Image (spheres, helix red, strand yellow):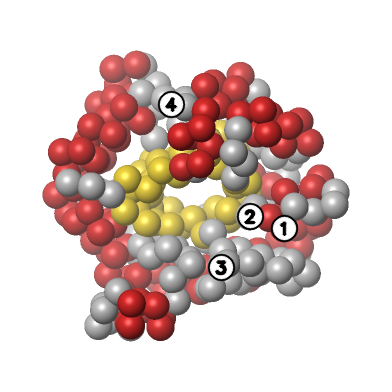
Amino acid sequence: MSSMADRIIVPLDVPTEAAAIALLDRLPQVGFWKVGLELFVSSGPSILTVLKERDKRIFLDLKFHDIPNTVKGACHAAGRYGVDLLTVHAANGKEGLRWAKEAAEAGALETGVLAPRLLAITLLTSINARTLAFDLKVPLELPEYVLNMALLAQESGIDGAVCSPQEVQQLRSMCENDFLLVCPGVRPSWAETGDQKRTMTPAEAVKAGANYLVIGRPITAAPDPAEAFGRICDEMASV
């Protein structure tokens, strides 16, 4: 597997464990998979066991956002799974983020697994500047808001952030070098953007400083998912 392939995370955005296993079978060359709310609520942690049995890396994308004590409990439980990445919303605030980090590490220690690297959601990539200003009534410009959320996460001890690729270059210049930047909303030039509002091609996102790219439908909905995955890897390697 190429180094670029290692940086692509493919979401298992399917409703059942059986459908997830079918997708895994179609794409054995993918080494990093994302499990989100729909599949986790449907299957529970058993899908994580399936992925571990296949020696896959896991991005558990549950986007915890609640009062600090509740997020702490959820992260403690999630830390026991031995996943690689775990998400919480930056909007939890400094106290909530610190508790989340400590709890995930404690849960991992109890079960003898590596603690997940925590990622803060800065702003969902389905939200554009107009939605932020008019629906959510946030007075900041979108890039400034995302930067503030990322810096808050970094100050709170969080390992990285999830952000649109359009914000990566700014965040990479302002955040520490070891602060992970993970980008959904990445679409090859030949793919439809779908419901993502702030997009960029994989090659552009890598060049801007993204560590990992979350790429779903351009791969999973392609007539030949393996061919689409390989094509994206080749495009990224040309950067």
Name the residue tied to disc 2. Answer: 215
Label 3 SS: loop
Q: Position of residue 32 (x, y in %)?
A: 60, 39
Q: Residues within 10 Å of mark 4 (few under 14, many from 20)?
A: many
Measured in 3D between alpha carbons, the distance from the residue under mark 1 to the one under mark 3, in whole angstroms, is 12 Å
Measured in 3D between alpha carbons, the distance from the residue under mark 4 to the one under mark 3, in whole angstroms, is 30 Å
Name the residue tied to disc 3. Answer: 196
- Decide which of 91, 136 is in the foreground and name it: 136
Mark nearer the viewer, 4 or 3: 3
Q: Position of residue 169 (x, y in %)?
A: 47, 72
Earlier sequence position, callout 4 versus callout 3: 4
Q: Is residue 101 above or below residue 144?
A: above
Earlier sequence position, callout 4 versus callout 2: 4
Q: Are marks 2 and 3 in contact (CB under 8 Å)?
A: no
Q: Quadrant of residue 122?
A: bottom left
Q: Are marks 4 and 2 in contact (CB under 8 Å)?
A: no
Earlier sequence position, callout 1 versus callout 3: 3
